[in-house]
Image (cartoon, helix red, strand yellow):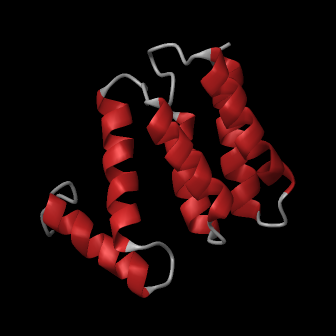
Amino acid sequence: MEPHADWSSGDDQQRIGAVWEAAGLLPQGEYVKLHRLTADVQANGGVISDADLDWAIALLESTPEVVVRARVMAMLAVLGQPTALPQEHRARIGAAVAPYLHSERKLDRLAAAHVQQALVARE
C-alpha cells in the first residue's frame, strides 16, 4: 500500500490549482486562495473576515462551475463551528446559497441544503 499523500504543502496546492485551471474550473490563484481560506477557517474556529466572506460569496455567485460552487459551499458550511457566526454573516450566507436550493444541478442542491442545515443547527 502506498503512503497517504500530504496535499497540504503550498507546492501541492499550486499543482492542484494548475490542474483546475487547465480544466477550466478556476484560475490557479483563486484555487490556492480558496484552499488557504478553508484551512484558515478550520484552524480559527469557523471565523472568517468580512473581506474573505465577500470574496467567497462573489466567487460562489460568479462561477459557472458546479464543482467550484460546491467547494465554496463546503467551506461556508463550516463557518461558525464552534465560534458563533455573526447574524449578518448568517443572513448573507443564507441569501447567497438560497438560489442553489432549487438548481437543476443536484450537486448545487445538495451543497446548498448542507449549508442551510448547518446554519439552522447553529441558531
In the rendered image, residue 63, in percent from the top left (x then y), is placed at 62, 66
> Can residue 5 be seen?
no
For residue 88, above or below residue 114: above
> Can residue 8 be seen?
yes
**Which residue is painted at 15% across and 68% down in the image?**
1
In the rendered image, residue 79, in percent from the top left (x then y), is placed at 50, 29
Q: How many marks?
A: 0
**Which residue is painted at 82% across and 50% down in the image?**
99
Q: Quadrant location of residue 54?
A: top right
Say which of 1 and 83 sits in front: 83
Q: Is residue 46 left or right of residue 92?
A: left
Task: Pick out the residue farthest to the front.
Answer: 51
Q: Quadrant location of residue 61?
A: bottom right
In the rendered image, residue 105, in percent from the top left (x then y), is placed at 77, 66
In the rendered image, residue 25, in percent from the top left (x then y), is placed at 51, 76
For residue 41, above or below residue 22: above
**Which residue is painted at 34% across and 66% down in the image?**
29
For residue 12, above or below residue 43: below
Q: Is residue 122 left or right of residue 43?
A: right
Task: Pick out the residue farthest to the bottom.
Answer: 22
Say which of 107 and 75 sits in front: 75
Say which quadrant the C terminus sits in.
top right
Q: Is residue 89 left or right of residue 28?
A: right
